[in-house]
Image (tube, grey):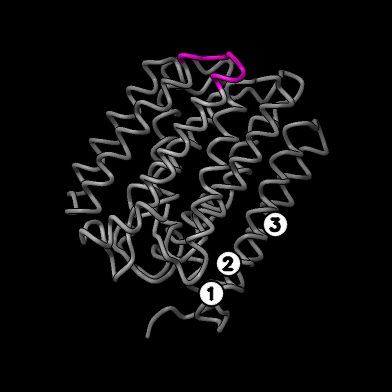
Amino acid sequence: MILFRKLSLEYNVLIYRGIPLIGGIAIGLTLCLAILFSHAILKIASPRILGIIIPAFAMLFFGLIDDWRELSVSTKALVQVICISILVSFGIRARIVYIGEFLNVIITFVWMLGITNAFNHLDVMDGVAATAGVLASLSFFIISVLNNDANTAVLTLSLATASLSFLIYNFPPAAIYLGNSGSHFLGFVLAAAALNLSYASLERKTALLTPLLILGLPIFDTAFVILMRIKQGRSIFRKSNDHLSLRFLKLGYSKNKTLLSMSLLAVFFSLSGIALSKVSGALGICIILLSVLVGLVITCRMYKVSVDG
């Protein structure tokens, strides 16, 4: 991390407001080295993991170009669609029983696009996106261990380690930023890892919602922002200071207290998701309803906070 930061500052490349945008490069290379080391020790390998890494690094590359010289919205969308197509070509897609392959592929594209961009939107304050990434990675790691899925366990633990090493330098006040490259990369890998896991048997249908809860913070933040912008008659694509973390700041919270609040919310969603993956019937429904209730309470509280001025 320090080496990349020094190089970025020395050559004045990928700098935003005096802070290097090299978090994506650092996380990507750390992830790659961790996976190679783990596979060398454990003697396991999977084409499906390669199928995640290849498009994720393509996403990272174009993200770096976007950080250097901003790409158009249409170009970004095209790149994301191509990367997801590569992912699907490796057999990584939703596998929901009874809805057929075509609908599963459609759901895969919607899921990947949604989570990838949700992490990008979440990255509006120091530490928030990285913390959500660490917690989600660890949650998927726990589920992969419980499912005896060694390859996904290596991938998610490696991502958690890489994200944590970055987070040390991203706590307020940040010394390194994720940048568009890092936030898109992090969201893409997590969304793909979620698809690579198995959750629900026919007896535990509610467990199918496990990844929605584990990634509940970026999903909730994006849904909250869209709802607020629609309510106020604003374009959902136009940038504004109405994200959840920025509303905490408007309430007078410090950056550290805001990060703590967002982190606790991420912990709640992650633990709910892990629990949901192992329960069935009425208990699973109760976990889902509790998560929805928490989201509604926060929405009712935070939508009153003025973000103008």
Q: Which residue is mark 1?
A: 255
Image position, residue 127 (x, y; %): 51, 61
Sequence order check: which comes first, mark 2 or mark 3? 2
- Packing grade of label 2 (10 A; few <14, some 14-19, many >=20) is many
Q: Amino acid at mark 2?
A: Leu
| Magenta residues (range) | 39-47
- Queried whether the magenta region covers residue 13, the answer comes back as no
The residue tagged with tag 3: helix, strand or loop? helix
Residue 293's label in the rendered image is: 3
Which residue is located at x 25 percent, y 41 percent?
62
- Packing grade of label 1 (10 A; few <14, some 14-19, many >=20) is some
Residue 72's label in the rendered image is: none
Q: Amino acid at mark 1?
A: Lys
Q: Nearer the viewer, mark 2 or mark 3?
A: 2
Which residue is located at x 35 percent, y 69 percent?
240
Residue 259's label in the rendered image is: 2
- Is there CB contact under 8 Å for labels 2 and 1? yes
Question: Please, is residue 40 above or below residue 11 in the view?
Answer: above
Which residue is located at x 30 percent, y 70 percent?
18
